[in-house]
Structures are given as C-alpha cells and as structure tokens.
Image (spheres, rainbow, N blue to C red):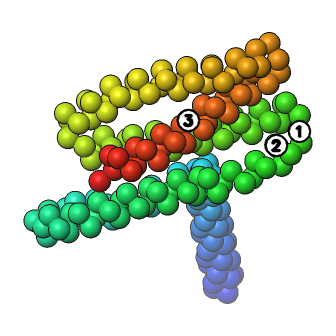
Amino acid sequence: MKKLLILTIFVGTVLTGCGSTNEAANVGQTQATEPAGNSTTVEQPATGQEEPAEEAPPAVAEEENPADAASPAEQGTASVETKQEYLQKLDEVEESLADLKALNEEGTTVSMNKAAEETYKRWDTALNEIYSELKQQLPDSEMAALKEEQLNWIQQRDETAAKEAAQYEGGTMEGLQYVATQAGVTKERCYELVEEYMK
C-alpha cells in the first residue's frame, strides 16, 4: 500500500513538472514572438512620419462628430489647427536637418552629396504627405486643378535645378548643386501648399 501511494505521488509530481515545463515553453514562445512584433512597429524612419499616424485618430474623431460638421465656425477652427499642425511639422523637418551639419562640414563632395540627397529626401517626403492630406481635404475640382499645377511645378523644379547646376557643368559640384536646388525648391513648395491650400 505504501509503495502504491509513493508511486502515485511520484507520478503526480512528474506530471505536474511536465505541465510546468510546457507552460514555461509556451511563455518562452510568447516572449519570443512579442519582440519580433514590436520591432516591426517600433522601427520608424526619423523624419517626423511617425506623427501623422498618432494624429490620425483625433482627425477621424472630429470628422465623425456631428457637432463639428454642423458648425462652420467650428470647422474653421479645425482647419486653422490643421494648417498650424502642418506648419509645425515643416519647421520640425527644418530642425531635423541639423543632424546633417557634420556631413557638410567634412567638405568632401561625397559627404556634401549625401547631405543634399538626405535633405531633398526629407522635404520630398513632407511634400508627399501634404499632397496626400490635400487629396482628403479638397473637393475633386480643386484637386484636379492642383494636380495639374503640381505637374507643372515638377517640371519647373527640375528646370531650375538644371539651370543652377549648369554653372558647374562637368565639375564635381554639378550633381550636388542639382540636388541642393531640388531640395530648396521642394521646401518652398511645401510651405506654399500648406499656406495656400491647407484647410
């Protein structure tokens, strides 16, 4: 009888231990998958693009609120906030360019090209974000006109960049001047679109 009782306790202990091991294994699997999931959402480019995702829910909430839709005065207030929000974002893009100062100070064509290309990339990203927002805000007729205007602007941007770069034709500065001009013209266009079209 004692042997049977000891055997039962032993088997129960072993089975309990196995259950704990399986639970530990499951916890380990959960912990292993959580960081992988988190790493996907955490990795964001450091160009201020993270902010639109955070700000989207309040904008949706405002649109769904019947009180906002009913009052033109309140809509005007929301419009000013949106314009101010984008002006702030553009100022933040300008401030973010400080991290490229070291590349420019190196004084080599390669480093200055990298800085110019990154500057252009950041302004172009901002421009695309603004354009996408305007697609949501503007009536179809206004958006069609803006699309045509934007196509003309792209051509003018490239012509302006080519003209500026022509001063250095055949030299190492030609490409740098082209991209730097594109960046400057794109920056101006960002502010122009926000000021003239943003609601």
Looking at the picture, tell me which residue is in the foreground, 189 or 56. Answer: 189
> Who comes first in sequence, dot 2 or dot 3?
2
Assess whether mark 1 and mark 2 are in contact (beta carbons under 8 angstroms). yes
**Residue where numbered disc 2 is placed:** 104
Q: Secondary structure at mark 1?
A: loop
Q: As shown in the figure, which amino acid type bears the numbered disc 2?
A: Asn
The quadrant of the image that shows the N terminus is bottom right
**Residue where numbered disc 3 is placed:** 185
Where residue 23 sits, quadrant-wise, is: bottom right
Numbered badge on residue 181: none
Q: CA distance from mark 2 to mark 3?
A: 19 Å
Using residue 46 as the reference point, say whether residue 90 is left or right of it.
Answer: left
Q: As shown in the figure, which amino acid type bears the numbered disc 3?
A: Val
Please report the residue visible at 55 percent of the width from the left and 57 percent of the height from the top.
91
Looking at the picture, tell me which residue is in the foreground, 93 or 171. Answer: 171
Q: Secondary structure at mark 3?
A: helix
Using residue 73 as the reference point, say whether residue 33 is left or right of it.
Answer: right
For residue 51, above or below residue 130: below
Numbered badge on residue 107: 1
Please report the residue visible at 55 percent of the width from the left and 20 percent of the height from the top.
159
Picture coordinates of residue 75 (x, y %)? 21, 63
Please report the residue visible at 64 percent of the width from the left and 57 percent of the height from the top.
95
> Who comes first in sequence, dot 3 or dot 1?
1
